[in-house]
Amino acid sequence: MNTISQSILEDRVSTGRFDSSISVSNETIHELIRLSTKAPSAFHMQNWHFIAVKSDEQKRKLQSASYGQRQVVEAAVTFIVCGLLNAHKSLSGNLQPSVDAGIIPESLQHSWTEMARASHENNARQQRDEAIRSASLAAMSLLVAAKEMGLDAGAIGGFDPLGLHETFQMKKEQLPVILIPVGRASDLNWPQKIRRPVSDVLQVI
């Protein structure tokens, strides 16, 4: 068992209050997202997109679109994690580097591309479900990556999707799924809250 990952999950707290004097570099932001994109996705579509809201002006706009929540202005950066609709259309190109590296054969690239096209084309619900799944996996990876890099993070599900689209001129295929504020926790946060016992949530059959 990977004891480092175990420790991260044991120690991670959903941070709601941040030290607003702390900033992060663009290099740190880049590395956080590089690690986040290690998340899995169906057919390796990698159907996610991240918007890093870092400047004071953009933070205030984000706060307005997230019902005034203070985390997005206190945190060093808040990521808008989006899933991508119509991601099947770019699947072949996304798989090409793995074909070139000899990781998967070209025949599998063609097979996966056709399977994704058949299941996603003209199927808005399937595209949306897949976008939410992939973005959620990437968001959890971002939470773990932040902790691994010595930072604190939380998750925000309360926001106005249409407001985000308009404010940040997002593309129509970008579906905002969750906000992840990242920075350094202030001393006003709760410790990790008690989880339900495994016996309540696990069924082994």
Image: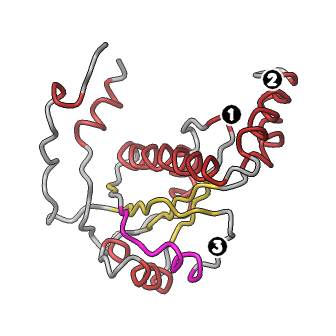
Q: CA distance from mark 2 to mark 1?
A: 10 Å
Residue 163 on the magenta segment: yes
Q: Residue under circle 2?
A: 108
Identify the image's colour scheme: rainbow, by chain, secondary structure or one colour: secondary structure
Q: Nearer the viewer, residue 148 or 135?
A: 135
Residue 61 on the magenta segment: no
Q: Earlier in the sequence, mark 2 or mark 1?
A: 1
For the residues bearing labels 2 and 1, Cβ distance under 8 angstroms? no
Q: CA distance from mark 3 to mark 2?
A: 32 Å
What's under tag 1, amino acid-wise?
Phe
Residue at left offset 59%, top offset 82% = 166
Q: Earlier in the sequence, mark 3 or mark 2?
A: 2
- Quadrant of the image for the C terminus? top left
Quarter residue 119 falls in: top right
What's under tag 3, amino acid-wise?
Met
Q: CA distance from mark 1 to mark 3?
A: 25 Å
Residue 58: % across, % down: 50, 82
Q: Report the span colored magenta.
A: 156-167
Find residue 170 and name its label: 3
Residue 25: % across, % down: 50, 64
* 118 w.r.t. 84: above or below: above
Residue at left offset 58%, top offset 50% = 131
